[in-house]
Image (cartoon, coloured by chain):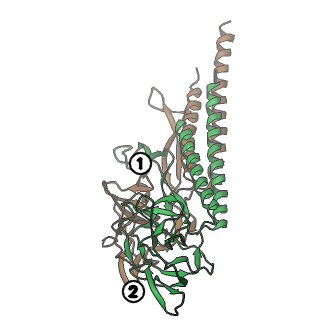
Amino acid sequence: MPNGIYSAMTGALAQEEHMDIVANNLANGSTDGFKAVQATFKELLDETREGTKNQTQRHVVLDGTYTDFSQGPMKHTDNPLDVAIQGDGFFVVDTAEGPRYTRNGAFVLNDKRQLTTVSGELVQGTGGAIEVPEGAVININQSGAVTSGPLEIGRIRVVQFDDPQLLDRIGHNLYAAGDGVDAKDLENASVLTGALERSNVNMIREMTSLIKVSRFYESFNKAIQTYRTVDGSTARELGR
Amino acid sequence: MFRALSSAATGMNAQELRVSMISNNLANVSSAGYKKTRAEFQDLLYDKIRASGAKTSDQTTAPIGIEVGQGVKVAGTHRDFSLGEFRQTSNALDLAIEGNGFFQVQLPNGETAYTRDGSFKLDSQGNLVTRDGYSIEPSITMPAQAKHWTISKSGVVSAVQAGSHDSVEVGQIQIANFVNPAGLDAMGGGIFARTDAAGDPVVGIPGMNGAGFVMSGFQEMSNVKVIEEMVDMIQAQRAYESNSRVIKTADEMLRTTASLK
């Protein structure tokens, strides 16, 4: 019996996983600071009993997912605590598990007048948490400095990574850095105030992927069906 | 595949909530002192099928991992306290706060609440009350023979009594300022209640400690911008549509598989 039916099966399974990824991207089309996930696939060759690779038996599997860190479009909100990074870099927030990184700059003040994310994680400044004094009207400038009149209260820390692909996505718009992945302070960060970076999910690209996924899936199923028919008729014809 | 179905469902839920926010904002476009709200979204946890940096052989490691997301959730709703437009009414008792802060009012249950809607009226006893009849705190009572009254930028209420030409100070309007007004609890009717997240109010006279001045004869309109809301609505509708397409496609794929024989 031909093993092609397994090639078709792995192909269909890979498309299923691709579908999950597309669905997550589309679900996060309105999540500020979200970066789209892209999938890569690879071909596996079957190893035959003699240890040589069988060139005719190919399987396709999901090889990996990577994050498309390209800039998302900016949305002006005119809210003084909304900030967005133009170009490379991440904001640093404190969580119970240590520092985490985010591109979502929809910040608010907590009851201690400290700058936090919407979920309450403290935003790191270059000199610790940023605390706004009583009655101060604050302004955040292009380099991330938080000022009240002529006085600098703090500076929002912006870091970058040699290879941001090594960051782990942990949900809640946050990324975690594993061992050996070091954050480097970005000296000349460009921060836009009164704006949010929208999700960089490209609707057209995702919808096209969706169509492709479903058509590929259909054809793999068709192939499985054909193998079954061939098998059936072979058994019938030869067994006669 | 079932992840795709549930991710798309979370996406549709999120857009539904966004449309509810937009429609509430639009419905309140003419409510004095109304502050628009927006929804903040976050991606859900990721299934880690393989971590990046995992060993692929003795010498090599995978440069990227496999992470499959599970959709979106609402992280919170954010009230935007930016100033609304001011409309002149020529009624001395219509007050607008030119900057941060809230008027304090006393609810029927004795609790203090906060509002930016300063369309005050006089009740039968001459007390300054909101349009719902909640008295301002500290209470201000106009003398019965008052002919006309003025309210200064810093909140001093003075009245000229019949048969006199001198104005007499009858009260002082105070403004409560919050560290984090976005954390206040909206109770409807333009009234907000204090919460721990909002912090304790700093009460003072208008123009002090970061509070805005009071403008008599003006009403603060809602800060909803119709065009922005309409654009957001179109985006929400398209996003909802694309998520429903995912569900439809996933369903078709499952059907193809189910019909294999």
Disc tally is 2
Question: Relative to residue A159, is residue B71 depicted above or below?
Answer: above
Q: What hue does chain B carry in this figure? A: green
Q: Which residue is mark 1?
A: B62
Q: Which residue is mark 2?
A: A150
- The chain to which mark 1 is attached is B
Q: Position of residue B88 (x, y in %)?
A: 63, 80
Q: Mark 1: give few (<14), some (14-19) or many (20+) Cα within 10 Å.
A: some
B248 on left or right of B202: right
Q: Position of residue B239 (x, y in %)?
A: 62, 52
Look at the image and tell me whether residue A18 can be seen.
Answer: no
Query: Identity of the amino acid at label 1?
Result: Ala
> Please, which residue is most extreme toward the top here?
A240
Q: What hue does chain A carry in this figure? A: brown
Asked if the residue at tag 1 contacts the one at tag 2, i.e. Cβ–Cβ closer than 8 Å, the answer is no
Q: Position of residue B255 (x, y in %)?
A: 64, 29
A201 on left or right of A127: right
Between residue B85 and residue B19, name the one nearer to us: B85
Query: Identity of the amino acid at label 2?
Result: Pro
Q: Quadrant of the C terminus of chain B?
A: top right
